[in-house]
Amino acid sequence: MTKAADEPQKDAIRSWWANAPMTYGEDHGQAMYTLADGSVENVELGSQRFFELADAVFYRWNEPLHRDDVPFANLFEYERFRGKRVLEVGCGMGCMSMNWARQGARMTSIDLNPVSIAQTRRRFKVFGLEGDILEADAEKLPFDDATFDHVYSWGVVHHTSNIRVAISEMYRVLKPGGRASLMLYNRNSILSKILVGWAEGFINLENLSLDPLELSSRYGDGARQEGNPHTWPVTKREIRRDLMPQFTNLEIKTLGTDVPEALNTWLPGLTRRAMTTAMVKSLARRWGWSLWMTGDKPSW
């Protein structure tokens, strides 16, 4: 987690995500979607229809995080940072950057992967939005100290080889009094502990040939395609002790939006027959796949 990435490894991460971008399609990296009527639609990457279908899946996965028809309004402080400089570290296909721009932020988006940059620029053009969208390394952000009022990252930094350096860079470019927020995968989750660690690692004996990092990467994003080069989920203790000790007002909570779908996938009908809504929410708060943390940079 803390070892500096060599260039071949970084190139492997860049290349993998360029070839398999986060499209939220039926297969990782593909733009094929199953519609509500059961039909399947293939669309062109970069088309308006692609963005609409990909966003619909992404929003559905995170439905509890939206409010008043504003995506992720239960997480993001859109009002506080309207007209302010906001940076997204790892913009993917640009959905979250789009929402910040629509809410009036002065948006800057970076990604290591050139396909993500091309698609995010295309998205902003399609929807008539303005923003600076740059190919850049999260571990070497090309910005001066104290440039941004808010810096955030969603599901990206755990794919870097040096999470600590990436977060330190986010801290460096944040203005005093500014806020950072991140989503990182949770090592103490149902998915990580049961699906990856127990089912694949122990039952299928994968831990005999794969170390914990390799196992997590193999069965994280893109598992059907033999996984990705680097995925390392974290724990709340690591966040407080190793990754974000320089931040004040640090808050960490578990987002369990994945838990109901995971339970229905592994044990179909369980949540309908044997579990109350309160029971599912309790599991989600404790064992969800995503950790959401916010912290402030002290003012001078």
Image: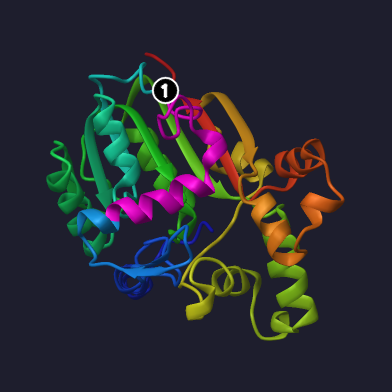
Q: Residue at x 63, y 45 (%)?
A: 238
Question: Secondary structure under badge 1?
Answer: loop
Which residue lies most toward the front here? Answer: 37
Q: Which residues are magenta?
A: 51-76
Which residue lies most toward the right here? Answer: 274
Amino acid type indicated by mark 1: Glu
Asked if the magenta segment contains residue 58, the reply would be: yes
Return the residue at label 1: 77
| Horizontal side, residue 255 vs residue 76: left or right | right
Above or below for 279 versus 209: above
Asked if the magenta segment contains residue 213, the reply would be: no
Q: Residue at x 59, y 56 (%)?
A: 233
Give the quadrant of residue 54: bottom left
Tell me where residue 214 appears, x and y as whole percent.
58, 74
Near-viewer residue (167 or 32): 32
Tell me where residue 290 appears, x and y as whole percent.
59, 47
Near-viewer residue (246 or 222): 222
- Quarter placement of the N terminus: bottom right
Q: Residue at x 65, y 55 (%)?
A: 261
Q: Residue at x 34, y 34 (%)?
A: 172
Give the quadrant of residue 167: top left
| Horizontal side, residue 268 vs residue 80: left or right | right
Residue 180 visible somewhere in the drawing: yes
